Image: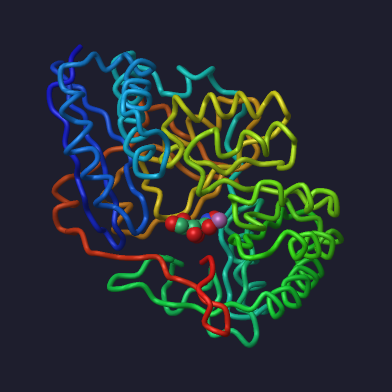
Amino acid sequence: MKIVNVKVIVCSPGRNFVTLKIETDEGIYGLGDATLNGRELSVASYLQDHLIPCLVGRDPFQTEDIWHYFYRGAYWRRGPVTMTAIAAIDMALWDIKGKALGAPVYNLLGGKSREGVLVYAHANGHDISETIDEVERYRDMGYLAIRAQSGVPGLKSTYGVPRDHKYYEPAERGLPSESLWSAEEYLRHVPRLFDALRNKVGEDLHLLHDVHHRLTPVQAARLGKELEPYHLFWMEDAIAAELQDGFRLIRRHTTTPLAVGEVFNSIWDAEQLIREQLIDYLRMSVVHGGGITAMKKAADFAAVYHVQLGSHGASDLSPVCMAAALHLDIAINNFGIQEHMLHNPETEETFPHAYFFRDGLMYPGETPGLGVDLDEEVAARFPYQRAYLPVNRKEDGTLFHW
Ligand code: EZ4
Ligand code: CO
């Protein structure tokens, strides 16, 4: 089999997605997600201008060699743009491989290690009572694990809390908006949120929280300690991800489990964290972590240290990535949990898929390959629109992490 044509499809069904489609001389094609939120066209260009010319004519079964060709062969290694582009190619090749062999991709990765994939939903509210209502709404839909975020009194906007959207969507069309941050207000508020939540929903539901990189190590240690009575599934991105030694300090002070890695793009971003057992869950995703080939190896390395996979699954990761993640999640032994943020109806229409949710778990489906398609006619109705993630400032105007 030979790769004969490769195209990059950029569309915006409510938000931007970049999708790679690799076509073969046998009529089989594969899809890969290449979406890098707020920086979409840089990956489209990296693929179009630099990688695709080297891909045409190759055997799509050679996932390992092709991965190294683009990783080592670039000389310039790692980085979100590079690794997202490589990930898209890798995903599409696994999709082709599965279709050609008549096998769902999970069967090429070790088969099913479990019946279904535990997922967590996002409950966001402007205040504690709204967040509790949202948690109960998702629990009634059957979710067994729910991330809870709430507006912080005194702050005009808070990470994770929608302004007027039905679905929370961090990227906005137009130029970047700005939000204001106060660690003091936040640190006072979050333990109150989880105290109220546990009182209302009891102990059985898994509760998660995303700090979104905004605390110092000592602040994160304080928050972790104060959240201990509420038994969180995890505290996510407690500090800036590049501050790896900071996790040692958090770890020394709290038994709240720690998750990090949605901004990581290679195992080298997480190697120390895993080897020193400073984290419990690795959140690197298939789309930003170099594809199925790289994520399988990262998961296997993490398994040596009993670190589990809890990969990023926000709505800016397309249904193609969601499908790839579910195939990997169901196959590996050290799977922990998968983030599942609902896609909007336009996105669902653009990307028909075999994966589905039932009673708190997700299933990749039995379709050969990844089991996800892109309806190009629908996609053409939603042309690309420039959009950015917000930027974040401290109350005195200092630019901070969003
Ligand atoms: O900010 O996906 O856990 N999920 C998150 C997301 C990320 C966005 C960035 O593109 O932190 O909301
Ligand atoms: Co996050």
Of 347 and 311, nearer the camera is 311
Identify the residue shown where x is 17% and y is 31%. Answer: 6
Identify the residue shown where x is 73% and y is 55%. Answer: 205
Identify the residue shown where x is 15% and y is 28%. Answer: 53
Residue at the extreme bottom of the image, as rendered? 154
Please determine whether, in this image, residue 128 is positioned above or below residue 335.
below
Q: Is residue 180 left or right of residue 382?
A: right
Of 265 and 135, nearer the camera is 265
Count of marks placed on residues: 0
Placement of the N terminus among the 4 image quadrants: top left
Please determine whether, in this image, residue 347 is positioned above or below residue 306.
below
Question: Which x, y percent locates residue 127?
Answer: 63, 80
- Specify the color scheme: rainbow
Of 115 and 192, nearer the camera is 192
User: In terms of image quadrants, where is residue 330?
Assistant: top right
Question: Which x, y percent locates residue 131?
Answer: 63, 73
Q: Is residue 342 visible?
A: no
Please determine whether, in this image, residue 145 is positioned above or below residue 5.
below
Question: Which x, y percent locates residue 43?
Answer: 28, 45
Q: Is residue 366 left or right of residue 307?
A: left
Q: Is residue 247 visible?
A: yes
User: In terms of image quadrants, where is residue 355?
Assistant: top left
Ligand 2, by image quadrant, is bottom right
Identify the residue shown where x is 30% and y is 73%. Answer: 175
Question: Which x, y percent locates residue 75?
Answer: 34, 28
